[in-house]
Image (cartoon, grey):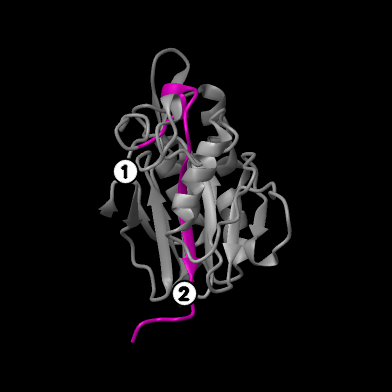
Amino acid sequence: MATTTEASWYIPDWPMPPGVHALQTTRHGGVSQEAWQSLNLGDHVGDRAADVATNRQRLAALLPSPPRWMNQVHGISVFDADAGGVGVPEADAAIARRSGQVCVVMTADCLPVLFCDRAGSVVAAAHAGWRGLRAGVLEATIAAMDTAPSNLVAWFGPAIGPAAFEVGAEVREAFVRQDKAAAAAFVAGVGDRYQADLYLLARQRLLRAGVSSIHGGGACTFEDREHYFSYRRDGVTGRMATLIWRDDEVDA
């Protein structure tokens, strides 16, 4: 669940400590047209570059600094957003400790996961499709945060739901080979196909890694055409952004 503040974005509803801020965009509030209507933030999906730039400028107006966009490749590399540098890093997660540094991931069915520690001293965002989940992107993000997993809080953003996420038997086998409990996240469908629950797979992995404070989940990007982009539903489509940052100025 979330608290809606504007149609184009909302603030995730989870127990963030003072000084930690998060934001989830929807498909509304931008200038993109046709398949990308309207707040598409992906510059790699065929949309007009000028429209994407305008959409990103509108998002940036809500943030303390421009987010460090990444080239997401369904891997497990974690980018240190505090490190600076030029260009677009190839990574599927980002962490930050510096005040005002924004971590961001883009999705349109894959699961965005936000992290922070209970003291609000480190934040992270991870892009977790089934390939990244199986490869260990969440575990890699936890390790990069360099704090006890029991000290972390996680939030699941909007992703494709189990009723819409059909996968082959090889996907189920890949997860079950790692953890037999993963079988609970797959429901047999037609033939050798299964309905996969990304939320449950991610929850299982976080719990196994020692993270027990897990929030969010339940939305379905595929079914909720009104609010979310979905690659599996539409093929050519836009991308939402899930963002988190911290600051050193906490109101008394």
Picture quarter containing residue 199? Answer: top left
Residue underneath mark 1: 218
Res 204 seen here: no
Q: In this picture, which residue range is highlighted in magenta?
A: 228-252
Res 235 seen here: yes
> Where does the image place residue 247, in percent across and percent down from the top left?
48, 75
Residue at the spot 56% in from the left edge and 66% down from the top edge: 101
Residue underneath mark 2: 120
Residue 76 lies in magenta, yes or no?
A: no
Residue at the spot 66% in from the left edge and 57% down from the top edge: 79
Report, in whole angstroms, how far the alpha carbon at label 1 lies from the one at label 2. 25 Å
Q: Secondary structure under badge 2? A: loop
Indicate left or right for 239 with 144 as reference.
left
Q: Secondary structure under badge 1? A: loop
Which of discs 1 and 2 lies nearer the camera? The answer is 2
Residue 243 lies in magenta, yes or no?
A: yes
Crowding at mark 1 (Cα within 10 Å: few <14, some 14-19, many 20+): some
Which amino acid, by three-letter code, is at mark 1? Gly
Does label 1 or label 2 sit earlier along the sequence? 2
Residue at the spot 38% in from the left edge and 68% down from the top edge: 16
> Where does the image place residue 64, in percent across and percent down from the top left?
49, 66
